[in-house]
Structure formats: structure tokens, C-alpha cells
Amino acid sequence: MIDFASFQKYSLFGGFSYDDIERIRPLIRIDAYSAGDFIIRENESNETIYFLLEGDVRISRDSVTIIDMSAGDCFGEMEILDVMPAAASVRALDPVTVAAIDNQALHRMYGLDPRLFALFMMNLARDLSRLLRRMDERFCEKVRVARCGEDLPAAV
């Protein structure tokens, strides 16, 4: 059984009171996946934000690993915000439990309480900003490593 009160400790629900979470609880779907299952497939439609409750997932594009995520992370937000096919695939590395909030649930959240919707979207923007920073750091590290290789003398 999922303890919805524990959602408060995760950044996506930062600032939500217990009562706030209870109000939006009917909008949240709980899904389970087995190791190896695809949750999202690259280039396919996705209208759901997933919040990882248990387990680990791998996000990849063109079979190249972008990042691994674990409990507390969310994914699927890009497709919600830009209404494009999935930019990457998300695959369960082990048994996974997610809280899922689809487009229709987000619209219902806005109708139910615009303040909670705004808070949720602000938290989502912050999570995306943190992810972008992590990806920037990884990119810069790869550039530094590549540049080090350029500085090495050629083998004679």
C-alpha cells in the first residue's frame, strides 16, 4: 500500500500539506512495472508524468544511456510540457512502482485548485532545472575528457 502522506518529502510535492495531497490523491494513478519493461518508448506519444516511488529506471536515446533515476525522481515531463513524442525511452532496471499523473489529471487539478496546480508546476520546473544542471555537468565533463585526449602526443 502506498503512503500518500510520504509524498511530502519529495521535491515534486514540496510545499504540499497532507490535506493538499489528499485533495489530489484521486488524480494520481499507481502503476507497477517489472524489470525490463518499457514505461515510455522513444518517439511514441506520452501524456503522463511519472514519479518514481520504488526501483530504478534507465533513460536512453538511440540505445545510449542518458541517465539512471531512482526513487524521488520524475520523468515524462518533457512530453507533457512540449506536446511532442517521447525524446527518450524509459526502462525499468528492477521492479518499479510509479505515481502517474496524466494530462487529463493535470487539467482536473487546475480546475480543483489552481494554487495546487501552480505549486505542482513550479516544483516540476525546479526539478527540470536540477536535471538540466546535472546534464550540463555531465556534458562538460565529457568535453573535458575529450579535450584531454586532444592534448596527448600521438603515438610514434
Image (tube, rainbow, N blue to C red):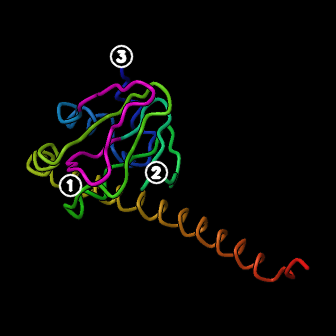
What amino acid is labelled 3 in the image? Met
For the N terminus, which image quadrant?
Answer: top left
Instruction: Please give the residue where the numbered disc 2 appears in the rendered image.
Output: 63
Q: Which residue is mark 1?
A: 115
Q: Nearer the viewer, mark 2 or mark 1?
A: 2
* 2 or 1: tag closer to the N-terminus: 2
Quick one: which residue is furthest to the right in this view?
156
Q: Which residues are magenta?
A: 29-50
> Which amino acid lies under the numbered mark 1 shown in the image of this protein?
Arg
Q: Quadrant of residue 16?
A: top left
Locate residue 92 relative to residue 144 in the image: left or right: left
Horizontal and vertical percent position of residue 129: 44, 65
**Observer-nearest residue: 70 or 153?**
153
**Residue displayed at 39% across by 28% down:** 97
Residue at mark 2 to residue at mark 1: CA–CA distance: 39 Å
- Secondary structure under the numbered disc 2 in the rendered image: loop
Tell which residue pokes out farthest to the top in this image: 1
Tell me what residue is drawn at x 78 percent, y 77 percent: 148
The earlier-in-sequence mark between 2 and 3 is 3
Which residue carries the number 3 mark?
1
Q: Amino acid at mark 2?
A: Ser
SS at badge 3: loop
Quote the CA–CA distance across marks 2 and 3. 34 Å
